[in-house]
Image (cartoon, helix red, strand yellow):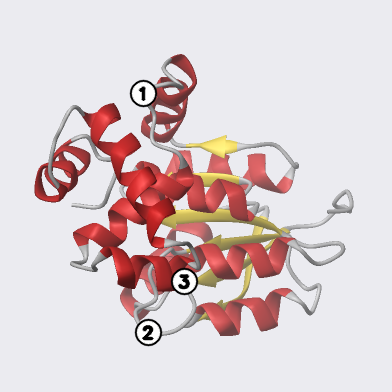
Amino acid sequence: MTPRTTGPIRLLLADDHPVVRAGLRAVLDTEQDFEVVAEAATAERAVALAATGAFDVVLMDLQFGAGMHGAEATAAITAAADAPRVLILTTYESDADILAAVEAGAGGYLLKDAPPEELAAAVRTAAAGRSALAPAVAHRLMDRMRTPAQALTKRELEVLQLVGEGLSNQQISKRLFLSQATVKSHLVHIYAKLGVDSRTSAVAAATARRLLRR
C-alpha cells in the first residue's frame, strides 16, 4: 500500500446485510475525515470495487453466505499492488477466523459490537498502515504466542472445523487436498493438545475455548 495523500479516508463497506451497512454508514458519516464511497453486498463485489483504486480502507465482513468468504476476498484484495487496507469487522472471534484473516493480509480485526469511537480509531489506524486489533482479539493472539506448544495450528483448526461439520477423514482429505494419513496425524495432535480422545470431545472442547465458532 502506498502512503495516503491528504483528504478524507475513502471507505468501502462490504457486508451482506443492508441494515448493517446502513448502520455503519450512519456512524462513519459523522466523522469529518471519512468518506463512505461505496458499499458491496458480496465479497466478489468488494474485490472488484477495491481493484479500482478508489479506496483507502475496506471494512470487510467474514461471512457472506454463499460465495466467496471474507478472508478469501481479503487475500485477493491485499495481493494487488497499491491495495487498500482491509479492516475485518465481524461477530466472530474464534482462533480459526482470526488466523485466516491475518494470514490473508488483513490490517485489522474488530468486532461488530465495538463502540463508534473504537471503530473510528481502528479505521484511522488501518489507513495509516498500522495494525488495528480489538482488545479481545489481541488477547487471543497473545495467548497463542505465550503457549505455542498448546495452540492449534491453522491447518489443525481447518481439520477440526470440518470434523465439526460432520465430514469423515476421507472427505476432509479431499477438501483440504491431504492424504488420509495426514488427516489422522493432525487429529492425533489435536487430541493431545486439547486433552481429549474423540472427535466429538475435540469439537466440544475447541468450541468452548473459542477456537472454533460457536
Is 155 rendered above or below residue 50? above
Instruction: Name which of mark 1 and mark 3 comes first in the sequence.
Output: 3
**Which is more N-terminal, label 2 or label 1?**
2
Residue 97 shows up from this direction: yes
Instruction: Say few, some or many: other residues with alpha carbon within 10 Å of mark 2 (under 14 / 14 to 19 / 20 or more).
Output: few
- Which image quadrant: the N terminus? bottom right
Residue at x-position 10% and y-position 42%:
201
Q: Say which amino acid is labelled 2.
A: Ala
Amino acid residing under circle 3: His
Q: In the image as oriented, which residue stretches furthest toward the top?
A: 146
Helix or strand or loop: what does disc 3 sit on?
loop
Q: For the residue carrying disc 1, how many other residues have a C-alpha within 10 Å: few (<14), some (14-19), or many (20+)? A: some
In the rendered structure, are the residues bearing label 1 and label 3 in contact, judged by CB atoms less than 8 Å apart? Answer: no
Left or right? Give the position of 22 relative to 80: left
SS label for mark 1: loop
Q: Which image quadrant is residue 81 in?
A: bottom right
**Residue at mark 1:** 150
- Between circles 1 and 2, the one closer to the viewer is 1
Using the rendered image of the protein, determine whether residue 114 is visible from the camera's viewpoint: no
